[in-house]
Amino acid sequence: MSNEKNYSPINGYVMILVVLGLIIGGIALLRIYLGIFLIVLAVLSLGGFVLVNPNGSRVLLLFGKYVGTIKKNGFFWVNPFFTKKKISLRASNFDSERLKVNDKLGNPVMISTILVWRVTNTYKAAFDVDDYQNFVRVQTDAAVRKLASMYPYDNFADEGLDEDITLRSSVNEVSEALETEVQERLAMAGIEVLEARIGYLAYAQEIANAMLKRQQATAIVAARHKIVEGAVSMVEMALHELSKKELVDLDEERKAAMVSNLMVVLCSDKDASPIVNAGTLNH
């Protein structure tokens, strides 16, 4: 059996009156064996009282046999020979340690996860795993290691990859994949994953500086590509307008010189210093 079942306990306040009655009756009949029996029975009955707080539960066992689970909160009385194991049904928060793992490209990265979970099946949590809280920690770490190996940290064009999902930029997709992976691992313990997301992500220290320079170089190349593309369009437009309005008649050599000068001005990192030519176009 791997399914929990609800147990309906007796109202604890009613049983307080019964126990008090047993004690009073025992004292009144103390001179005979019945009185001693009533007092012993009252003392044994005190072990049956149980308090269940909101979002709490008690798993009941009778000599190793599962009897049921009390999930409703209140003050109750059960068989005093029951073993009562307390399991919280509250949402719990788990922030894993930072793990050093390899991404899809083999680059070492530091990663941690934040997990929000709760117990939904008290039988599985109590009996299908040895320690369900430690089970959550171990399986979460295993899921993070597997997830990190499935995606690259970032998408670099020179790697020949065209990955749509990366650990750095695809936060929602990675979180959904992590939640699914963790839920599959924790289902056998009767645990529901409410939220799973990456809490920390960075390159490992030994390659962090090199990767930072690589990212900067990639950004510079991309910016230069846009600058050159815009400069070519502007030069093309300038030549077209000059030819259309017949402001000046340029031969191929002068067009080449003009294109060269405009490209230098438009693509330069610094402002160009103008030089006024007081002579002819050839000097």
Image (tube, helix red, strand yellow):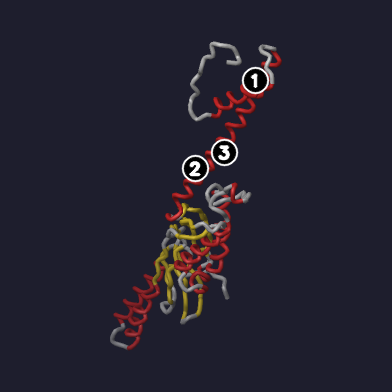
Instruction: Say which mark, if any, is on residue 111.
Output: none
As displayed, is residue 219 above or below residue 195? Answer: above
The picture quadrant where one finds residue 41 is bottom left
Sooner in the amino-acid sequence: mark 1 or mark 2: 2
Q: Position of residue 280 (x, y in %)?
A: 59, 12
Q: Amino acid at mark 2?
A: Gln
Instruction: Estimate the spatial distance between the alpha carbons at disc 3 and disc 2, rounded to whole Å.
Output: 10 Å
Residue drawn at (60%, 14%) of the image: 281
SS label for mark 2:
helix
Q: How many marks?
A: 3
Contact (CB < 8 A) between labels 3 and 2? no
Q: Residues within 10 Å of mark 2 (few under 14, many from 20)?
A: few
The residue shown at (34%, 82%) is 40
Residue 73 shows in the view: yes
* Residue pictured at 40% horizontal, 69% vertical: 50
- Coordinates of residue 126 in the picture (x, y in percent): 48, 72
Residue occupied by mark 1: 254
Query: Which element carries disc 3, helix, strand or loop?
Result: helix
> Which of the image's four quarters has the N terminus?
bottom right
**Image spot of residue 156 (x, y percent):** 57, 48
* Quadrant, the C terminus: top right
According to the picture, the residue beneath numbered tag 2 turns out to be 216
Residue 40 falls left or right of residue 253: left
Alpha carbons under labels 1 and 3: distance apart: 31 Å
Q: Which residue is mark 3?
A: 222
Q: In the visual, does 88 lie left or right of 35?
A: right
Q: Find the distance from the CA under tag 1 to the CA under tag 2.
A: 38 Å
